[in-house]
Image: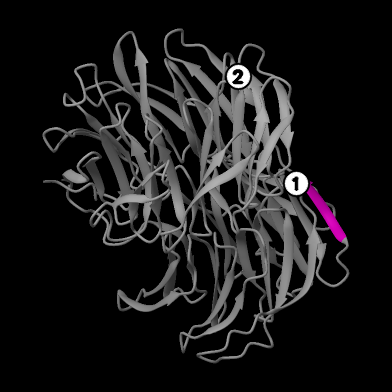
Amino acid sequence: STTLAEAGFMKNDSVEVVRSQNGLRGHRKIVTASQDGTIRIWQADLGYKRFSVEGEALPVRAAGFVCDDGAEILVSGGADGVLRFWDGFGQQVQSHCSHSNEILDIAIKGAMVATASMDGSVKVWNMSSGAQKLLGGEGRAPMWTVAFAADNFIATGCAIGVVQVWCLSSGDCVREFRGHSSCVSSVASQVDLVASASWDGTARLWDLRSGEGRGVLQGHDDRVRAIALSQDCLLAATASDDRTARLWRLEGAECIKIFSEHEDYVTAVSFHPSMTILATSSDDGSVKVWDVRAGTCRFTLPDANSEAACSVKFSPGGCLLATVGQDGTAHVWDVGESEMLLQLNSRQIHAGPSVSAAAADAEGRQVALGNFKGEVQVWDLVRHALSREFRAHTAAVWSLAFSPDRLASSSFDETIAVWCRSSGRCLHLISDIGTCIWALQFSTESRLLASGSNNGMISIYSQEDAVCASTTHVAGSRVSAVALHDNAVRCVAFSSDETLLASGSDDCKAIIWSCETHDICCRIGHPTPVRTLSFGLPHRLATGSEDGLVKIWSITTAECIMVMAGHSGPLRSLSCFAEGERVWLVTGSQDNTAKVWNQL
């Protein structure tokens, strides 16, 4: 046997069992897309890897097969926004630099491929004709999910809770369904019905033709992660962070079954083609197969995953079930016998989960790494050894910030933790935020902590009342909160005297405002989302954006006084430092390069 562990899998990775025309027992393949930036195809029947595609330099977010003149073409979407097509020998046959930010989801229908991206756009590709269609435009709210709907339509869900239906012919948005109060995490469609799941704890049903709501599936006590529709369009299944999966009769939006044997978040749900059984996966590491009619668990797959299970999918014929865990393993199961046919393994490259956030201290002695499991590790760069490990989060860590005596971390679980670097104790655990935090920054004297969130809100927390206790978590006092942006805030920075705070956002703006009065000092416009900024230059602000440009601005006149071009990809980090009278600027980009600028 072999193990798919060449890189740690994350929740958005893709594993799919694909059946050829030779029958259920002939030439099944498994496609994996992984955080190490590779696509691999495995021959499931024989248990060996068919070929490995390693053309992606950045993490792969989604993958699947598209049919082109009878041939199976592999399509992949990566964190670099590039859509790539591969032939049966693992050779790249074409690529399209389709998005300026990550591709988050792929939908496939026949020879058509649709991509949803963090840049706010959806693009549709026709492999047969080569035609392309742009739906929406960059600078909008991130598109999290996409699904082909009936006839000539596509349904999408975005970060601000809106479901949109697009006409493929005209490229226009013909319907907007509003009702969710948080991110739309999943969409599905059958016939004239569109279903959406959201972090607001509900799923909603919409009529594709009339645009009217057809019901709200209410009952979950936490975020709804996924939704699936039966092929006859009579039933829906949902998976939620409240540790349950639910079965709904669409007529009347009635919950008819609750599957509640999981011990942690239910992450995915899949209908068997016969619609008589249902599979669910969970962060408790288990995969369960349920009898739809009886509402009972038929069986739990033995030792499905040693860690959280994040994906489950039936094969088209229904005889096989593929499961994926965050421990980097994939399994193929005989559904009828509940027997594992094979466990696919290959050489493990990464010793731990994929890194999702990083930060270095001012002295250059330590670096902190956050991962997709919610863990934070601090490494000593002098001794080349692990110094401390912090655990308070239950989901991916998105941001880290150092102060001389503290370390702050924010997570997808909508919490902020502040740690004492010397003792390793948690000083603050701020859990009443209600949205994901993308950015953190301490002030120069560490008195204040600023955060930027997914809903455009900027908050400042006092750090002077921290209690260093092993059993008591005291939330930091929020001294101010302002909503200045129309989209997610991706970066924040204090001025050296702590009087000003700058913020950059997906709404393509950077804003400088007074920490005391909350008055806006200046507003800076960019053509693309602002990803990083720094006050390190005297009386100036440096910004880096998705277009790969670094710009230097006067903070008094908001005038752009310098533009530096050199990166071929989006900017991800920016830092300033002084050496005598000379000021240097260091930038890091998604083009896999770092540059040092001395024209300042």
Residue type pointed to by label 2: Phe
Residue 200, percent from left and from top: 65, 52
Is residue 136 on the magenta stretch? no
Report helix, strand or loop for mark 1. strand
Residue 304 vertical placement versus 37 (above, below): below
Residue 442, percent from left and from top: 64, 73
Query: Callout 2: few (<14), some (14-19), or many (20+) C-alpha neighbours within 10 Å?
Result: some
Residue 59 vertical placement versus 441 (above, below): above
- Answer left or right for 86 relative to 294: left
Q: Are marks 2 and 1 in contact (CB under 8 Å)?
A: no
In terms of image quadrants, where is residue 26? top left
Query: Callout 1: few (<14), some (14-19), or many (20+) C-alpha neighbours within 10 Å?
Result: some
- The label shown at residue 560 is 1
Instruction: Look at mark 2 in the image and give the residue it sits on.
Output: 153
Q: How is the image coloured?
A: one colour
- The label shown at residue 386 is none
Q: Main secondary structure of the magenta part?
A: strand
Tell me which residue sits at (23%, 53%) in the image.
349
Tell me which residue sits at (40%, 48%) in the image.
280
Residue 396 vertical placement versus 11 (above, below): below
Residue 56, percent from left and from top: 35, 37
Residue 80, percent from left and from top: 47, 38
User: Between residues 599 and 137, which one lies in front from this camera angle?
Assistant: 137
- Magenta span covers which residues? 520-524
User: Between residues 25 and 89, which one lies in front from this camera angle?
Assistant: 25
Tell me which residue sits at (58%, 84%) in the image.
473
Residue 53 shows up from this direction: no
